[in-house]
Image (cartoon, coloured by chain):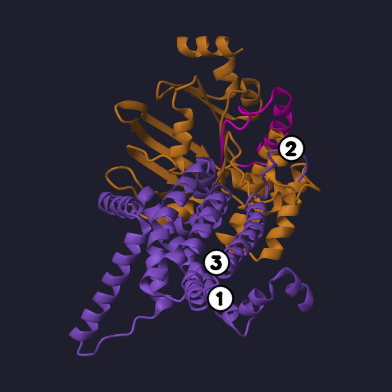
Amino acid sequence: MTGLFELLGLGASAELLSLSGWGGNLLRGLANSLQIAFGAFGLGLVIGLFGAYGKLYGGKVTRDLLAIYTTVIRAVPELVLILILYYVGSDIINKISEGLGGGRVEINGVAAGIWVLGVVQGAYATEVLRGAIKAVPVGQIEAAKSYGMPAFMIMRRVTIPAMMSFAVPGLANLWLIATKDTALLAVVGFNELTLETRQAASSTRAYFTFFLAAGFLYLMVTLCSGAVFARIEKWARRGQPSLKGGTR
Amino acid sequence: MDSASAAASALETDTRREAIRVEDLHKSFGNLEVLKGVDLTAQQGDVVAIIGGSGSGKSTMLRCINFLETPSSGKIVIGGEEVAMRGDGSPANQKQIERIRTKLAMVFQQFNLWTHRTLIENVIEVPVHVLKVPKAQAIERARELLDRVGLGGKEDTYPAYLSGGQQQRAAIARALAVDPSAMLFDEPTSALDPELVGEVLTVIRDLAAEGRTMLLVTHEMKFAREVANHVVYLYQGRIEEQGPPAEVFGNPQSERLKQFLSSVA
């Protein structure tokens, strides 16, 4: 095995990427990235669900506030938003801490990353879910109402399951964006995959090796996500005949 | 029938109570007044057919009874209990209207089965989650009901794989599963292909024969004449004429009803 690597001139790369060396750092960076992407996507879903319901059924003030939220977040470049939200967020926390007589607080990188990306994801998720809820045939909800279901049960038992098939493709997009947006957190010094890669590359001067390896890891995440979302979509579309025809 | 049960059924007839009462019901959509003061009473066991041209307000009236549409004004009394209404006609007490709705099972023109649930899941949904019937018991009852409407063996099929007639029969099974005190049929055969109408009417006819209270908005005049014991003709938001089917269909009084009957015949 080693002989083969030597033959191809890859021996050095293999050694650099070994798990005990920089390779381990890359994987730790990937784990951090995924952790943030999961958290941000989840937070985004929660914000998005409330946002979508607020936009569809809320009062005028709620709808206006949500319109400002989704417009501003989607208008400003994400890199700028990350810088704003990160520094504003840590500043506010420190002000509060000092106001309460405590010292400066060390901001947890993972929590900060989840908060920052989650707020961004929430704006997009609001629109994805709003569209999906509107696509649910009104008769489905009327039937639930006419049988005495309370509003929250209608949401849980009818609206959300029925909208899933419309929402999943958009949400899959959001998830993939979340995994890649974690790279932007490198600007605030968070040790996710991209920053780890840059550090490894600049320490060893093996730029090509490390960035190729990082690209490969991102690709693997995308491929696995694709498989997972294909299953989720199949489940969400249960009961709907395939567009290609054929049997259930 | 032995004498005891004959006496019991006679007693039942004597103490028949009203199932649904509608008083001076008005409904406007913006400037358009669709219902201009409708009064209607259905006793338990009554089959009331509501007929009328398109835009006469018959579906709107039915949908006001369970507050799928908010009446503009009027009074709705279900099983002796008046639905509390706010000034704008919306239900004042959400809990009350939800409770009353569970007694009124609606069958829709477009079936409105929940497409992400199989037939049996559709039928047990309300019993299990709203009425809190134990699941095993609900499933057993749902199987009986699906059998009864001729859908035995289709329990695990999703609605999209069934014909309109089958879907509507499943929707009727869903309605029966809540053990309703009255059933509201909103043009149950209007979305069906002609050859599928019969199978749905057969099921409804059986339900009428077993003494179920129902309000039936329909375009099937022959069927209305056959199953209903009271027919209401709506014209432009008012009851133009009503009475036993033999009278309404056999000897219509108003010019409009005569015209309507000859146009649909």
Which residue range is magenta in the image? B183-212
Q: What element carries label 1?
A: helix
Q: In this view, does A71 lie to the left or right of A19?
A: left
Say which residue label 3 marks. A211
Label 3, label 2: how many angstroms apart (C-alpha)?
Answer: 44 Å
Q: Which chain carries label 1?
A: A
**Residue density around tag 1, few if under 14, some if 14–19, many if 20 or more, within 10 Å:** many
Label 2, label 1: how many angstroms apart (C-alpha)?
Answer: 45 Å
Q: Which amino acid does label 1 sit on?
A: Leu
Image x and y of residue A73, in percent: 33, 55
The residue drawn where x is 39% and y is 48% is B82
Q: In the rendered view of the protein, which quadrant contains the N terminus of chain A?
A: bottom right
* Residue B203 within the magenta-colored segment of the rendering: yes
Q: What element carries label 2?
A: loop
**Residue density around tag 2, few if under 14, some if 14–19, many if 20 or more, within 10 Å:** few
Callout 3 and callout 1 share a chain: yes
- Between residue A57 and residue B22, name the one nearer to us: A57
User: Chain A appears what colour?
Assistant: purple
Image x and y of residue A40, in percent: 45, 66
Does any portion of residue A197 appear in the rendered image?
Answer: yes
Label 3, label 1: how many angstroms apart (C-alpha)?
Answer: 10 Å
Letter of the chain in orange? B
- Between residue B149 and residue B23, name the one nearer to us: B149
Does any portion of residue B103 appear in the rendered image?
Answer: no
The residue drawn where x is 29% and y is 43% is B88
Against A39, residue B159 (above or below) is above
Q: How many marks?
A: 3
Say which residue label 1 marks. A26
Q: What residue type is labelled 2?
A: Gly
Against B256, residue A15 (above or below) is below
Q: In this view, does A145 lie to the left or right of B126?
A: left
Q: Using the image, tell me which numbered label, if any, was put on residue A245.
A: 2
